[in-house]
Amino acid sequence: MMERSSRFISLSGFSGIFIGLVGCVTAFLLFKYQSVLYSANEFSEFRSALQSLFVIGAVSLITAVAGAVFFTLRKTKKLKLPFWSSVTKRILFSLLVPLAAGGIFCLKLTQLNLIFLVLPVTLIFYGLALLNTAKYTFRETAYLGLIELGLGLIALFLPDYSIWIWGAGFGIAHILYGLLVQRKYK
């Protein structure tokens, strides 16, 4: 009873798996558009490719969040627990503050044409957001946050591999996290 009032135990492992699948597809699409971005001869071609990347990112984010909410709502109904609670509000605040700061920082990086830093920075801020949120969810969330943060720092120093590292963080790490959570907290 006490754990239910202080922790969000309705987080579904399927949410993590779904986010990971979206991350893998997104990494593949980013890889495809990367060559268009770097081979653009004119500013208008570059801007068009950048807009396409932004749309891919926005659609992926919306899809991942929608899937996570869907699977979590399904689990809360199954457990007969409320979805919207004081713990949910704390999780959202803890998650959204670092993510919003990271998003604004990424927009500024893009404005400064430092696009090669955007993928590592998204991993870093997402990792920090997960670490910030872990106190309200499963212990494994903190481990996922550390993995995301570590991969983001590695990607800073290996920009030629940042798409693959990003895919490993948002894709593979999430799938493994989701499988672990699904198995452990069924």
Image (tube, rainbow, N blue to C red):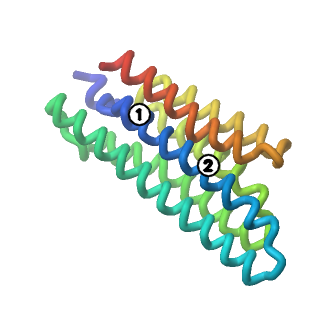
From this view, report whether residue 10 is shown above or below residue 37: above
- Mark 2 residue element: helix
Say left or right for 151 vs 24. right
Tell me the residue at 41%/49% (across/down): 92
Query: Looking at the rendered structure, which numbered label has been put on residue 10?
Result: none
Mark 2: give few (<14), some (14-19) or many (20+) Cα within 10 Å: some
The image shows residue 103 at horizontal and vertical percentages of 60, 61
Tell me the residue at 41%/54% (across/down): 63
Observer-nearest residue: 3 or 19? Answer: 19
Residue denoted by label 1: 136
Q: Amino acid at mark 2?
A: Phe
Tell me the residue at 85%/43% (across/down): 157
Q: Amino acid at mark 1?
A: Tyr
The image shows residue 12 at horizontal and vertical percentages of 34, 32
**To which quarter of the image does residue 148 belong?**
top right
The image shows residue 120 at horizontal and vertical percentages of 72, 48
**Quadrant of the snapshot with the C terminus:** top left
Query: Label 2, label 1: how many angstroms apart (C-alpha)?
Result: 32 Å
Residue farthest to the top? 184
- Mark 1 residue element: helix
Residue denoted by label 2: 28
Residue farthest to the left? 80
**To which quarter of the image does residue 116 belong?**
bottom right
The image shows residue 97 at horizontal and vertical percentages of 52, 54
